[in-house]
Amino acid sequence: MRSMLPIAIGVVVIATAAACGGGQPQVAPQPNADSVAAAEAARRRTADSLANAQRMRDSLDRMRRADEERIRRMRDDSVSAIRRTTEEVRTMLMARINFDYDKSDIRSGDASTLDQKLGILQANPMLRIEIVGHCDERGSDEYNLALGNRRALAAKQYLVTRGVAADRIATRSMGEEQPLQPGSTEEAWAMNRRDEFGISGGGDALRRPSGM
């Protein structure tokens, strides 16, 4: 009995030591190679998605800027074309007609000039004009004022009888007060016997008549 006591004590000591943590420490599991590869692939996919989204935004932004520039150029070209056309039409509209000495009849050669103005007035229904009659220096002031008025009215009547509303055309006379060509020669007198045409309203953007 005495001989078995030391053996029993030894067994108890060994069991106690094992119960008190005498075993090996626990080690956390390490990720395997497949898990690492999967995480890296997911990271790359996320980065690629972000890069693709940025490229798409950049592309859309470039397209937007290109469209804005194209629209701006088109608008500028359109405005420039309207301005050029308006200036051309104004130049045609302001072409003068002339008269024979002491006459207010429309000469055959000047009828085509008035026909051109007729087309412009028809193509631009908001346009209003003024016709100013002029004379050479011969004759009294009173006579020349009356003659200049008859010349302006003659041109107005030509246009009105062809369909232009009378209230779109104003007339007045300057008599001999504004000679185009100073001097007392036949050439100067011929130039000064004239009607001049100006725009009194609706002339900011003019259309060219078809066929002109």
Image (tube, rainbow, N blue to C red):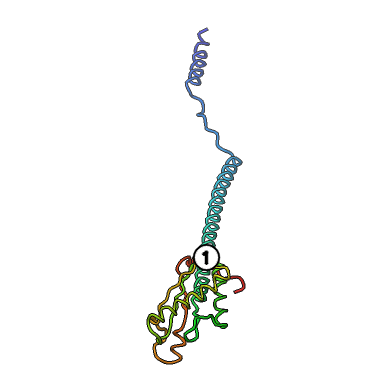
166 shown above or below 192: above
What is the count of numbered marks? 1
Along the viewing direction, whichever of 192 and 73 lies nearer the viewer: 192
Q: Furthest residue to the bottom?
A: 185
Q: Which residue, given by chain and number where applicable, does mark 1 sit on? A: 73
* Residue 34 drawn at (x, y percent): 61, 41
98 shown above or below 2: below
- Residue in the image at 51% along x and 18% along y: 15
* Residue 64 drawn at (x, y percent): 53, 57
- Residue in the image at 53% along x and 58% along y: 62
Mark 1 surroundings within 10 Å by alpha-carbon count, few (fewer than 14), some (14 through 19), many (20 or more): few
38 shown above or below 146: above
Figure quadrant of residue 175: bottom left
Name which residue type carries label 1: Arg
Along the viewing direction, whichever of 21 and 117 lies nearer the viewer: 117
Along the viewing direction, whichever of 87 and 13 lies nearer the viewer: 87
Secondary structure, mark 1, is: helix
Q: Is residue 28 left or right of residue 182?
A: right
Along the viewing direction, whichever of 52 and 6 lies nearer the viewer: 52
136 shown above or below 116: below
Q: Furthest residue to the top?
A: 1
Q: Is residue 174 left or right of residue 37?
A: left
Quarter in which the C terminus is drawn: bottom right
- Residue in the image at 56% along x and 79% along y: 111
* Residue 20 drawn at (x, y percent): 47, 21
